[in-house]
Image (cartoon, rainbow, N blue to C red):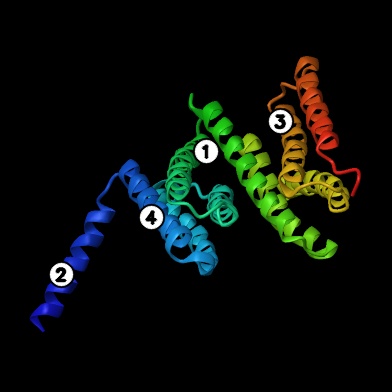
Amino acid sequence: MNFKRKAKIRGRGAIKTLLGLNKRERFIFSIIFLSLGLFVSEHLLGKSGIYTVFTLAVLTDILLFASLYKDLKDNFFWQIFILPFFFSLAFGLFFFLVPARYLTRIFSTSLYGIGLYSLFLSENIFTVSSIRTIALLSSARTVSFIMTLLSFFFLSNVLFSLHLSFFLYIIFLLLYTFPLTLQSIWSHSFEKQLSVNIQWASILTVMIVEVASVLWFWPSTPSVLSIFLTGVFYTIIGISQVWFDKRLFRNVMWEYIWVAAVIFVTLLVFTSWAG
């Protein structure tokens, strides 16, 4: 009985200590916990660790909510949970395709931890910026977009590597393209009416999926196809974001046109025409 009482007291003390941490300390605790979870699922569990990856993605949102609980009480936006979930999911699934070397796992886990910490800080800025304008908003949008592109590339690479049937391919593509598009639009509009965000995200998602449907038949490697599709995502979403920011000038348009041209040429160069 004494042992059980001591265990309960220690458990309550640990919870109080965790709740007593400030926001940045909770971020650090969450990143360390999630990074260790990713390393274990990748290095120790082997292929069975794929089930742990989905749990890790859910835990990412739970820990983010716990870290931002005070800010979210009076200003809740569920959109901030989209990207952290897919970032953890994308990292976990993609690195099962990478050779299982110890140094590679350490590097991928470190990269995951740094990226997720930057993402947590960005979501914190979005939460505050939806109430008042702050100087770091532009940086947070840039970090968020980079992490979105990285997540989209990893998930697309995994999807192309599975060689699914056409209809399953389109379904899985929609499952991550639409949420990531929705989050990208919201991060620049901060539109509180969900219907407006969904309308824009649906139109842009259809455009991306139409291009992706052609890539299912294209004779090239998963890496090249995912790079091209990520470039398409970057062009379509990037133009939409600068339009929301009212910065869609001629020179900006040409930048995106050049990016689209380069990735298209890259796709043509690395296409296996003989196949």
- Left or right of 23 on screen, residue 62: right
Query: In this picture, is 268 found above or below 193?
Result: above
Q: Is residue 2 visible?
A: yes
N-terminal of the pair, mark 1 or mark 3, is: 1
Choose mark 2 or mark 1, whichever is in front: 2
- Left or right of 74 on screen, residue 183: right
N-terminal of the pair, mark 4 or mark 3, is: 4
Coordinates of residue 248 in the picture (x, y in percent): 76, 22
Query: In this picture, is 144 found above or below 257?
Result: below
Q: CA distance from mark 1 to mark 3?
A: 16 Å
Disc 4 to disc 3: CB gap under 8 Å: no
Graded by Cα atoms within 10 Å as few (under 14), some (14 to 19) or many (20 or more), the crowding at tag 1 reads many
In the picture, the disc for residue 126 is 1
Coordinates of residue 151 in the picture (x, y in percent): 61, 46
- Left or right of 79 on screen, residue 237: right
Disc 1 to disc 3: CB gap under 8 Å: no
Q: CA distance from mark 4 to mark 3?
A: 38 Å
Choose mark 4 or mark 2, whichever is in front: 4
Amino acid found under the numbered disc labelled 4: Leu
Coordinates of residue 8 in the picture (x, y in percent): 18, 73
Q: CA distance from mark 4 to mark 2?
A: 26 Å
Q: Secondary structure at mark 2?
A: helix
| Mark 4, residue position | 36
Amino acid found under the numbered disc labelled 3: Phe
Disc 4 to disc 2: CB gap under 8 Å: no
| Mark 3, residue position | 244
